[in-house]
Image (tube, helix red, strand yellow):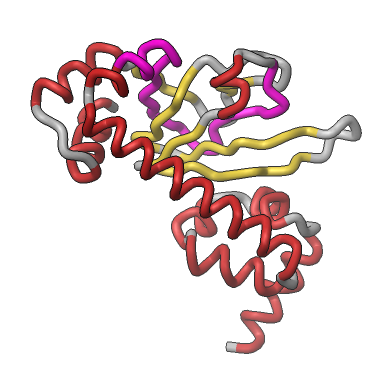
Amino acid sequence: MFPEFATYIKAQANLSDHDIELIHSKAIEKKLRRKEFLLHQGEVCRYKIFISKGLIRTYATREQGSEHILRFSAENSWTTDPESFEFDTPSSLNIDAIEHSELVLWTKDDLRYLITNIPGLKTYFDKLMTSSGSLFRQRILSNISSTAEEKYEDFVKNYPEISARAPLHMVASYLGVTRKTLTRIRHAQVKGK
């Protein structure tokens, strides 16, 4: 689990072997089975989470039981509930595994310590936050201005590995369309080829 993270972070940030050892000393390695939760709605999110292997989803569940997926996180990506993590407030989100997953986690205090003591890690997280904010703004714009067909085409183009691995009903939830609509779009695409 950590070796995959070490390979990833060395390619992303200017870090020494000592920096990697320090990051490892604060890391918690965890395996999740398929459908196992890392965070339930109402709990405080205690970790910043790196996915070494597998597929994770972050989503909200409404009172009537419908799910609204905010993001999928596959290998070499991060997830958390940023507000709950930062402010120690109950989360409005769930985080669980779509596939067997291997994770590396850091607590808020440990992550702050690492960012304070490793300048290259701070620079990396600053860039990550900017990139994440940009992706969320693009997603919001797409949700309010794109057709269901355009949203699906964009999802498949930008996340081909996730579109192949996530169940259809979850992709529909992520796109904000019904499963029936997504099935119709996919059938139309197959016919059009």
Residue 89 placement, left or right of 180: left
Residue 141 placement, left or right of 50: right
Q: Is residue 92 magenta?
A: yes
Q: Residue at x 61, y 36 (%)?
A: 58
Front residue of this view, candidates 191 and 132? 132
The image position of residue 135, as x and y in percent, is: 53, 54
Which image quadrant: the N terminus? top left
Front residue of this view, candidates 175 and 143? 143
State whether residue 46 is above or below residue 135.
above
Front residue of this view, candidates 39 and 48? 48
State whether residue 27 is above or below residue 129.
above
Q: Residue at x 73, y 65 (%)?
A: 182
Q: Residue at x 50, y 69 (%)?
A: 157
Residue 28 placement, left or right of 133: left
The image position of residue 33, as x and y in percent, is: 50, 26
Q: Residue at x 41, y 22 (%)?
A: 31
Q: Is residue 64 magenta?
A: no
Which image quadrant: the C terminus? bottom right
The image position of residue 132, as x and y in percent, is: 49, 46
Dividing the picture into quadrants, the one containing residue 137 is bottom right
- Span colored in magenta: 90-113
